[in-house]
Each structure stands twice: as C-alpha cells, then as structure tokens.
Image (tube, rainbow, N blue to C red):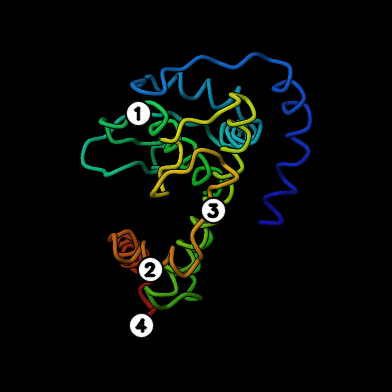
C-alpha cells in the first residue's frame, strides 16, 4: 500500500483542490443505472477515484458495462471492463464501480501473482488465493478513502455506499473495515476464494513443469 500511496500522491494534489471548489454533482442515488453518469460523479466527487481512473486509462483504458450472471461486480482485465450485475442501481452501483476501479488500478499487482504461478514461485492454490484476496482487502482500504471524499463532497453520504457493512452506518467515521482474518473467512464462505482456486488451475496450465 505504501507504493500505491506514493504513486497517487502527486496526481491527487491538483484534483483535490479543484474538487473542493466545485458544487456537488447531482446523481439519483436510489435508481441511477447510467454508468457514464456514475463514473462522472465519482471522478468529480473523489480525487482518489479520479487519479486511479486516469492511471487505468493510461494503461489501456476502461469501460463500464452490465453483465448477467455475476452477483455484484468484477474487473475483466482481458476486456478492460468493469462488469456489473444489471440489477445494481444508485449508490450501491456507484460504490461497486468505485471498488472495482481499485481492482483495475491494482491490475499489475494481481498479474504479478498470476505470473508467480507460471514461474513456479507459487505452487499451491491456497497461497495463490490468499495473495489475491489480500490485494482485494487493500482495495477495500482504497475504497474507504473514496467514501471519505464522497462524503466530503456531498456533506452526507447515502447509506447504500457501504455495501460490505451490515448494519449500514450513517457516516464514514462509523464505517470500520472487517479484520483481515474475518474478511478472509467471509471470502471463503461466499465462494469468492474458490474462484481464485479455479483461476490458479488456469495459470498452472501455462506452467507444465510445476508439479515435477
């Protein structure tokens, strides 16, 4: 996370000053499904999101689109697309977009984990999944900082932005991330970690000598 912070620090200085002087961007936090409007809102409301988005643009760009068959959202690196469940709407949808932008921003780190399997440095699905899940936990930390900026921009943040919290707090100050061990247990129970087990097998196919 220290490297991530240093990369973003310079990029954030000017946008943070501008965001403080601009009026809040209007968005229907109950029903909006317009991905362009949501992306525009997040760029205006959060200098951190804006900085990450510009870096992702520099690395090849991104789009945001709906995809049936997923429970929430995901970053499709091959298509450079943030994919969303079509039923997501309003603040909940915007919050998922913000989180998946952290995955897009950390794509190179996720790729390093994949390549470590190909190189024979990671040899078990457990270690592979753990490293990916820890990157996603770092993504939650970045996501929380985005929420801080959105709350500052709006004055009060809609509760649906807290998509991983139950019950939902009414301020970011009351929003605490889960302990990392609790997070890992939850990811395992939800089946999220199992998806990384499957992805590990895909990476192994590119390293035929891994089991020898």
Q: Does 30 appear above or below 97?
A: above
Are there few (<14), some (14-19), or many (20+) residues within 10 Å of tag 3?
Answer: few
Residue that carries the numbered disc 1 in the rendered image: 65
Along the viewing direction, whichever of 7 and 210 lies nearer the viewer: 7
Q: Quadrant of residue 47?
A: top right
Whichever of labels 2 and 4 marks the residue nearer the N terminus, that label is 2
Residue that carries the numbered disc 4 in the rendered image: 211
**Where is residue 106 drawn, in percent x and y?**
55, 49
Q: Nearer the viewer, mark 4 or mark 3?
A: 3
Along the viewing direction, whichever of 37 and 183 lies nearer the viewer: 183
Query: What is the C-alpha distance between the residues marked 2 and 3?
Result: 17 Å
Q: Describe residue 57's horizontal placement relative to residue 71 as left or right.
A: right
Whichever of labels 1 and 2 marks the residue nearer the N terminus, that label is 1
Q: Does 5 appear above or below 80?
A: below
Residue at 60% x, 45% y is 173
Residue that carries the numbered disc 2 in the rendered image: 185
CB-based contact (under 8 Å), mark 1 and mark 3: no
Query: What is the C-alpha distance between the residues marked 1 and 3?
Result: 29 Å
Mark 3, secondary structure of its residue: loop
CB-based contact (under 8 Å), mark 4 and mark 3: no
Quarter of the figure with the N terminus: bottom right
Query: What is the C-alpha distance between the residues marked 4 and 1?
Result: 39 Å
Mark 4, secondary structure of its residue: loop
Q: Tag on residue 176?
A: 3
């Amino acid at each position: 996370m220290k490297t991530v912070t240093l990369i973003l620090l310079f990029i954030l200085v000017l946008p943070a000053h501008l965001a403080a002087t601009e009026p809040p961007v209007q968005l229907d936090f109950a029903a909006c499904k317009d991905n362009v409007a949501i992306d525009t809102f997040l760029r205006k409301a959060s200098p951190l999101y804006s900085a990450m988005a510009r870096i992702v643009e520099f690395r090849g760009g991104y789009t945001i689109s709906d995809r049936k068959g997923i429970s929430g959202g995901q970053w499709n690196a091959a298509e450079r697309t943030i994919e969303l469940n079509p039923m997501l709407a309003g603040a909940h949808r915007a919050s998922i977009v913000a989180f998946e932008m952290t995955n897009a921003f950390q794509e190179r780190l996720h790729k390093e984990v994949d390549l470590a399997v190909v190189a024979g440095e990671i040899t078990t699905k457990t270690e592979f999944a753990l490293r990916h899940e820890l990157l996603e936990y770092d993504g939650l930390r970045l996501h929380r900082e985005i929420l801080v900026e959105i709350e500052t921009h709006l004055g009060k943040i809609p509760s649906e932005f807290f998509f991983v919290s139950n019950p939902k707090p009414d301020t970011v100050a009351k929003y605490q991330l889960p302990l990392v061990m609790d997070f890992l247990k939850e990811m395992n129970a939800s089946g999220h970690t199992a998806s990384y087990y499957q992805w590990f097998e895909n990476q192994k196919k590119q390293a035929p000598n891994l089991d020898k």
